[in-house]
Amino acid sequence: MVVKKKEFYCNLGVQTGYAEIKPVLKAVRMPDGTVSSFCQFTLAIPGERTSYTIFCVEELAQQCAESVTPGDYAIAYGRTTCKRDGSGVCLEAVSVLDGGSEMDIEQAADDELTGPLHITLRGSGFHNMRE
């Protein structure tokens, strides 16, 4: 009997913290001439020295720009990468849950933080799958 070894790598990340700035919706022209929208904001995470930069694109970018405000508790899911200049970690979000400004991460119970959490990640957080 031959067993194939499967390698599986995942760089799916989850960041939980408080939004430091209001996301601003911006547009960028792609090389093929299409225009794509994106937004960027930072999360302050209790216990961490630095903030994490969160990037959102297309429809998620519009939703974040409309709903997320400074001080809001947020959970961001996506693909973690390093910044180009090597100064820190950023997350390309595929989903952002906005918990509002009333949530206290350090005092809340686990079920209060996530609630009924059902999320489809569209496979964007997985790479380098081979047999």
Image (cartoon, grey):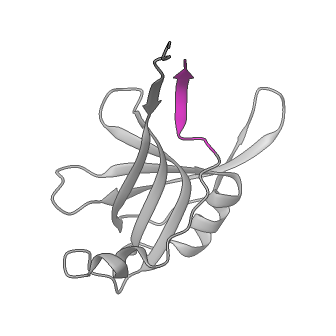
61 in magenta? no
Instruction: Give the side of residue 13 with respect to residue 68, left or right.
Output: left
Position in image of residue 104 (x %, y %): 26, 80
Taking the spot 54% from the left edge, 25% from the top edge, the residue there is: 129
Farthest right residue in view = 33
Q: Quadrant of residue 45?
A: bottom left
Query: Vertically, is 75 above or below 106?
Result: above
Q: Compare residues 38 and 130 and report the one nearer the observer.
A: 130
Taking the spot 16% from the left edge, 50% from the top edge, the residue there is: 49
Instruction: Give the side of residue 55 with respect to residue 33, left or right.
Output: left
Instruction: Give the side of residue 124 with respect to residue 117, left or right.
Output: right
Position in image of residue 63 (x %, y %): 64, 67
Farthest top residue in view = 2
Position in image of residue 57 (x %, y %): 64, 50
Q: Quadrant of residue 64?
A: bottom right
Taking the spot 39% from the left edge, 32% from the top edge, the residue there is: 83
Taking the spot 36% from the left edge, 55% from the top edge, the residue there is: 15
Q: Compare residues 59 and 114 and report the one nearer the observer.
A: 114
Query: Vertically, is 47 above or below 13?
Result: below
- Span colored in magenta: 123-131
Total labels drawn? 0
Q: Compare residues 19 and 130 and report the one nearer the observer.
A: 130
127 in magenta? yes
Query: Vertically, is 127 above or below 120?
Result: above
